[in-house]
Amino acid sequence: MLTFDHRSSLDPARPLVSMYGSRLFRLGRDDAYFVQVVHSNAGFLGESGQIGHADFCVNGGRLQPGCKGHVMRIARCSHFMSSCYFAAAVKRRIKMIGVPCDSTCPKQGHWSFRYDRKVVKVDEDIPETSRGMYCVRVDHEESCPFD
């Protein structure tokens, strides 16, 4: 039985959950009536691929612009950018539009767009009928510039 009707996940953690946690600790579509996921460091510190009902792969989902330094610093910054993006979208400081694309995240090279679904705005009021992976592009050159 579901206890939540809407759940938002911001770059759900991968390494420790994969190494030490059982499948019960992994986020999935069964965790709420509607699960939305924002990927910003997929495949490294964050889970890759589609996890929720509607997943948003931001800037390719792996490395975020504005994150600088050595590899781990860039990964950590990219991982936490999902929080910045979602907060900025909810506060309406930026407009994040998800365009339907294939179910892989992180993206490499050209993105394969799908035209059988509508674009979706990322925020707390996402339509519960939204399904699949959405590609989002956010242009910025600072780390967490939206506070």
Image (tube, rainbow, N blue to C red):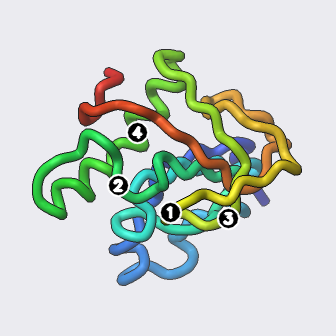
Please tell me which of labels 3 and 1 falls first in the chain. 3
User: Which of label 1 and label 2 is nearer to you?
Assistant: 1
Horizontal relation, residue 52 to residue 40: left or right? right
Please tell me which of labels 3 and 4 falls first in the chain. 4
Please tell me which of labels 4 and 1 falls first in the chain. 4
**Residue pictured at 60% horizontal, 57% vertical:** 111
Give the secondary structure at mark 3. Answer: loop
Residue 103 is tagged as: 3
Residue 38: % across, % down: 53, 48
Of 109 and 92, which appears nearest the observer?
109
- Name the residue that disc number 1 marks: 109
User: Which of label 3 and label 4 is nearer to you?
Assistant: 3
User: Which of label 4 and label 1 is nearer to you?
Assistant: 1
Vertical arrangement, residue 57 with respect to residue 21, above or below:
above
Please tell me which of labels 1 and 2 falls first in the chain. 2
How far is mark 4 from mark 2, CA to CA? 14 Å
Q: Amino acid at mark 2?
A: Leu
How far is mark 1 from mark 2, CA to CA? 13 Å
Q: Amino acid at mark 4?
A: Ser
Residue 63 is tagged as: 2
**Residue pictured at 84% horizontal, 46% vertical:** 117
